[in-house]
Image (spheres, helix red, strand yellow):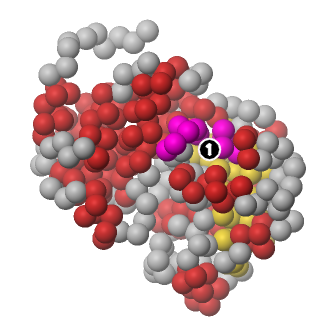
Amino acid sequence: MTVVAVLGAGSWGTTLANLLARKGETVRIWAYEAEVVDGINRRHENPVFLPGVGLHPGLQAFGDAQEAVAEAPVVVSAAPSHAVRSIISRLRGAIKAETLVVSATKGIENDTLALMSSVFQECLPAVRFAALSGPSFALEVCQGQPTLVVAASRTEGTAQAAQRIFATPNFRVYSHDDVTGVELAGALKNVIAIAAGILEGLGLGHNPRAALITRGLAEITRLGVALGASPLTFAGLAGMGDLILTATGDLSRNRALGVALGQGQTLEEYQARHRSVAEGANTSRAGAALGARMGVELPIIQKVGEVLFSGKPAREGIGELMARELKSEQWR
């Protein structure tokens, strides 16, 4: 039995905490919202982010992050990307050296354009860091549906430790050594999923969606290779697998945002009706900025950002993508 602290009680953080509690670990989850803490402790349910899903009665929720992580040898970071730095900075004295920290956040920091591995390297350089990613809807994991993900670390032993912590008969974890590729794929697939939702909201069909997913994966791969990742990572679970799921699945928050945009809603109107974070919105700007920094063209990601934040009509963005200079598909 291992004490595991989970930081962030959104749908994914709650799901991972529940998975570990059902596996027999001692799990403490920190939630920002008092109603979530109360719901988990009293009714064994997250009423805000995972309503209707019964949680393991041994799962304990805390409103104090320091209390949640105290003496925990394993910490799971599942907060939104924009909040991770501020949360872990306040916990510098509580998270000890050599703690296994598993990041389940799929995003890029807006201001610095840093992946979560870089944020932890700056704030908690002595921990053992792994990134957990792959095609995994929270609700289906809670239902016990077979799910495959990867745990990536630059140290083989750390990747295998994360692999062992999370592996269950229905949650298969592969180890991986390409942290940059796994994190970048997990972040940018959300942007392509918004684009896929926009196509659906506009009433477009299968041809454009297949093209979008394929060319979106090419963009993500180009940027990943420029940042030192292996191109093979993007053909795996964290790349192609997660992209297909998020761009096509009905449970995808990012796809749902795109559908709303395609039907004429603005980002502000959509956010006013939804408490859950669609990471792809902010990632569209951060990803485009990272591409500009690295000199890598990301036309789809760029257009999604323009639709979200500059008021560009979605059909106009599609027309501009189709009218780009003709090129070879071969990528060198």
Taking the spot 62% from the left edge, 44% from the top edge, the residue there is: 116
Q: Give x and y (percent) for residue 5.
A: 74, 65
- Where does the C terminus fall, quadrant-wise? top left
Whether residue 40 is visible to the viewer of this picture, yes or no, is no
Q: Identity of the amino acid at label 1?
A: Met
Residue that protrudes farthest toward the bottom in the picture: 42
Q: Is residue 175 above or below residue 60?
A: above
Which residues lie in the magenta part?
Answer: 110-120
Q: Which residue is mark 1?
A: 116
SS at mark 1 in the image: helix
Vertical order, 331 against 60 (above or below): above
Q: Position of residue 238 (x, y in %)?
A: 53, 39
Task: Give the quarter of the image for residue 74.
Answer: bottom right
Could you tell me which residue is drawn at 37 percent across and 58 percent down?
253
Nearer to me, 262 or 149:
262
Front-most of residues 209 and 311: 311
Residue at 18% from the left image edge and 42% from the top image edge: 312
- In x, y percent, where is residue 9? 58, 69
Query: Is 320 rendered above or below residue 116?
Result: above
Residue 78 seen in the current view = yes
Is 19 in front, or is 323?
323
Quadrant for the N terminus, please.
Answer: bottom right
Specify whether 315 is left or right of 278: left
Q: Is 310 left or right of 178, judged from the image as shown?
A: left
Residue 117 within the magenta-colored segment of the rendering = yes
- Most foreground residue, 293 or 281: 293
Residue at horizontal 84%, vertical 44%? 126
Is 288 one of the magenta-colored residues? no
Q: Position of residue 280 (x, y in %)?
A: 40, 48
Against 279, residue 43 (above or below) is: below
